[in-house]
Amino acid sequence: MKLTPNMRANLFIWGCIPTRLYLAWIPQEMPQYLRHIGLIVSIMALGTLYLAFTGNRMNAAEGGMKTWWAPFRYIHGALLAIAAIMLLNNDSNASIPLGIDVIIGILTFFIKRLGLPN
């Protein structure tokens, strides 16, 4: 099934962003799970940085077969890595890099969607 531009936008706005917001919220509301979330975020960081450094998965179906966000993988991966280290050290302030990541994700999406210059 080929995703239309509207389907891809909905997947990002109603799937990706709420998931990332939830990850940023957990450290503040459920501090007993910091290390568990830290392991999950560590895997996310490693995967994102792997894709950034290897250039793999440049034709993602959810991106219309063009991974336009590839240049932002370094920032996304670094913020996830910082948050993972903080979470593994039981630091609930990990919400800060996770929140920054959400903001950057939303901004880059709308800049791309509206055709604004990068």
Image (spheres, rainbow, N blue to C red):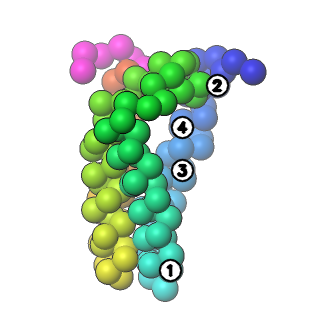
- Identify the disc placed on residue 13: 4
| Main SS, magenta residues | loop
Q: Magenta includes 117? A: yes
Residue depicted at 44% across the width and 49% down the height: 47
Q: CA distance from mark 3 to mark 2?
A: 16 Å
- The amino acid type of the residue labelled 4 equals Ile
Q: Is label 4 or label 1 in front?
A: 1
Q: Magenta includes 47? A: no
Query: For mark 2, what is the residue?
Result: 7
CB contact under 8 Å: marks 3 and 4: no
Crowdedness near tag 2: few (<14), some (14–19) or many (≥20) residues, C-alpha within 10 Å? few
CB contact under 8 Å: marks 4 and 2: no
Of residues 57 and 13, which is closer to you in this image? 57
Crowdedness near tag 1: few (<14), some (14–19) or many (≥20) residues, C-alpha within 10 Å? some
Query: For mark 1, what is the residue?
Result: 33
Q: Point out the tag, 4 or 2, that comes first from the N-terminus.
A: 2
